[in-house]
Image (cartoon, helix red, strand yellow):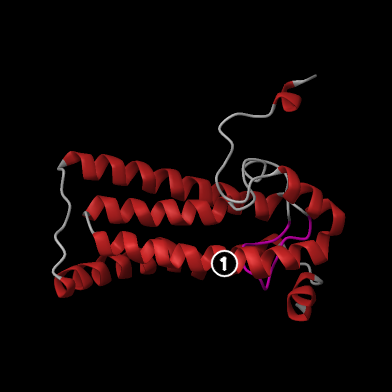
């Protein structure tokens, strides 16, 4: 935990944060999707799993999940950069607790977006193993967030984070806002 708190004690310029995100973007937007497609294809063949194909349905559903996921993830990264003065990287964490959209919908919109994006790829290519891989990696990521990142956020932001955690869902966004949010 001390290492995370040490990382959080240093502030970075917008330029430094943008430079740090370049390899991260390359990894998440190009390398991991490529590996998912290639690896799941090989795994499907090895396990003799059929592809599920429904023509345009795969493409429409996969693209919809993928675009929604990537959009949600990029929106959350933008909020971390501008509102929180940080990045998604643990080594360059936010300096302020971000409680503005999309973080008002759920506490982990970037994780949700990443999982949806991966599932979108799996549906697009019709691969059961791609969906299984994304589910397994998503579960591991959620465990990290729940058991490590949330403790670190609580240590850094104290009662503000505890209050935020109590009122904001972990992963699945609220469909409707609560009645008290609509009051003037």
From the top left corner, tell me how far across and down residue 97 is, in percent: 77, 53
Question: Is 61 in the magenta?
Answer: no
Residue 151 location, x and y as percent?
Answer: 74, 67
In which image quadrant can residue 172 be found? Answer: top right
Closest to the observer, 174 or 109: 174
Q: Which residue does the numbered mark 1 point to in the structure image?
A: 143
Q: Name the residue located 71 percent from the left edge and 24 percent from the top edge.
A: 179
Quarter holding the N terminus is bottom right
Relative to 62, residue 94 above or below: below
Tell me if residue 93 is in the magenta stretch: yes
Res. 22 in view = no
Residue ID at (55%, 62%): 142
Let me know if residue 164 appears in the view. Answer: yes
Q: Is residue 114 above or below residue 143?
A: above
List x then y, in percent, for residue 2: 78, 80
- In the image, 12 versus 75, the foreground residue is 75
Q: What secondary structure is found at the residue carrying circle 1?
A: helix
Callout 1: few (<14), some (14-19), or many (20+) C-alpha neighbours within 10 Å? Answer: few
- Tell which of 91 and 54 is nearer to you: 54
Secondary structure, magenta segment, majority class: loop
Q: Which residues are magenta?
A: 85-96
Q: In the displayed image of the protein, which residue is found farthest to the right?
A: 159
Location of the C terminus by quadrant is top right
Residue 96 in the figure: left or right of residue 55: right
Q: Residue at x 48, y 64 (%)?
A: 139
Q: Residue furthest bottom?
A: 3
Q: Position of residue 99 (x, y in %)?
A: 73, 45
């Amino acid at each position: 935990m001390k290492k995370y708190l040490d990382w959080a004690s240093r502030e970075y310029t917008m330029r430094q944060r943008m430079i740090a995100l370049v390899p991260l973007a390359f990894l998440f937007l190009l390398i991991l999707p490529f590996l998912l497609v290639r690896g799941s294809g090989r795994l499907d063949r090895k396990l003799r799993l059929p592809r599920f194909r429904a023509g345009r349905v795969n493409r429409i559903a996969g693209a919809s999940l993928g675009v929604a996921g990537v959009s949600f993830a990029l929106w959350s990264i933008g909020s971390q950069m501008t509102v929180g003065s940080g990045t998604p990287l643990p080594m360059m964490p936010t300096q302020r607790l971000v409680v503005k959209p999309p973080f008002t919908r759920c506490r982990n919109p970037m994780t949700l977006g990443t999982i949806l994006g991966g599932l979108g790829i799996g549906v697009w290519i019709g691969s059961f193993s791609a969906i299984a891989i994304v589910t397994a990696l998503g579960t591991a990521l959620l465990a990290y967030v729940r058991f490590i990142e949330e403790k670190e956020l609580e240590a850094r932001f104290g009662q503000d984070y505890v209050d935020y955690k109590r009122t904001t869902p972990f992963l699945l966004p609220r469909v409707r806002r609560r009645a008290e949010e609509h009051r003037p």
